Image (cartoon, helix red, strand yellow):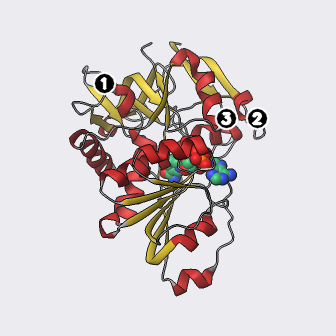
Amino acid sequence: MPIMRAAFVSRFDDANPLAALAVGERPEPDHPGEDWVTVQVRASSLNHHDLWSLRGVGLAEAQLPMILGCDAVGVDPEGNEVVVYPVVPTPGDPRGVSILSEHFPGTFAERVAVPRPNLVPLPDGLSPTDAACLPTAWLTAWRMLTTKGRVEDADAVLVQGAGGGVATAAVALAVAMGKRVYATSRDAGKRDRIAALGATAVEPGARLPERVDVVIETVGAATFDHSLKSAAPMARIVVSGATAGHEPKVNLRRVFAMQLEILGTSMGTPGELYDLLAFCADRQVRPVVDSVIPFSGVEEAFARLHGGEAFGKVVLDHTA
Ligand SMILES: NC(=O)c1ccc[n+]([C@@H]2O[C@H](COP(=O)([O-])OP(=O)(O)OC[C@H]3O[C@@H](n4cnc5c(N)ncnc54)[C@H](OP(=O)(O)O)[C@@H]3O)[C@@H](O)[C@H]2O)c1
């Protein structure tokens, strides 16, 4: 059986997810449908999703071993450079779709298989390592701001836990859209770096100089009350993650009195990925990259994400 090098999860460890990471040989990916193709991966990037997978969130024992990784840029069978859209049709999943590494092998490998319609041309001017940041974290942030948050009608935006991959994307995109952006981070060094992106950086829970029209929430329980208190009348609080707990206390009086909208979202559509790639290419917006690490250093990359010191995206270079 042909084999390739990959990073995968073969058991779960909620307390110490890094201990559940395996690096070694796995079979070449199958083609579950006729329109599936194999992409030679050139760059990928880590997401908190990969840590959840190691902890056993979103995966069942029966699905192990599973190659991790949602994001990839690579070369298709015709030699074209492509960005991989990671949401694939998945009969049997209640959502009708899944993200690579949930039901089908992920991108932390020499090669990944996806349906051909999931291939998006890599735009001129975007490097593979930059574009590998976009399909999950940046796409999620783009949809949170645009389709869900209706940011075109907003003056001010709050981004919680702004050192993270989705959060730095939301800050960079909202600044590029000309909005007044506030961002919280627990870490003083990250607040300095957020300010350098053009946001007003504050400590978690700090009173803002104005109420905001859109809140970008990926932290959850630790920040949700602050999100509610910071929201202007008719504001949209858009939630795509709950890193610090998924059961916050919600003051419903504030929700109805201020006529707030709390909106859940996941990933984005292929059309939104096209729009995001075009926005980044045309407006010279580049992802916030914490580090680019050769694929041979994948354990180091996971340790960096898990340790919480990363600012922006941790990228893997599969060509180094
Ligand atoms: N639904 C979707 O489609 C989708 C897509 C992408 C991500 N997500 C979810 O969104 C979340 C963020 O993902 P990511 O890849 O951006 O993660 P990440 O890069 O690991 O960032 C997580 C951020 O959360 C903040 N944080 C963590 N614990 C916190 C706490 N106790 N109090 C306050 N802030 C805390 C940190 O901000 P500071 O260190 O700056 O304080 C950290 O930078 C994850 O839960 C992920 O599963 C969902």
Above or below: residue 218 compared with residue 65: below
- Judged left or right of residue 57, residue 166 is left
Query: Helix or strand or loop: what does disc 3 sit on?
Result: helix
- CA–CA distance in space, label 2 to label 3: 11 Å
Near-viewer residue (276 or 234): 234
According to the picture, the residue beneath numbered tag 3 turns out to be: 307
Q: Residue at x 62, y 58 (%)?
A: 204
- Judged left or right of residue 161, residue 278 is left
Q: Is mark 2 within 8 Å of ligand 1?
A: no
According to the picture, the residue beneath numbered tag 2 turns out to be: 16
Q: Mark 1 or mark 2, which has the lower sequence index?
A: 2
The answer to whether residue 92 shows anywhere in this view is no
Query: Helix or strand or loop: what does disc 1 sit on?
Result: loop
Q: Residue 73, position in %: x, y?
A: 37, 29
The answer to whether residue 167 shows anywhere in this view is yes
Q: Residue at x 36, y 50 (%)?
A: 173
According to the picture, the residue beneath numbered tag 1 turns out to be: 76
Above or below: residue 29 compared with residue 268: above
Closer to us: mark 1 or mark 3?
3
Above or below: residue 93 compared with residue 122: below
Near-viewer residue (4 or 237): 237
Quarter containing the C terminus = top left
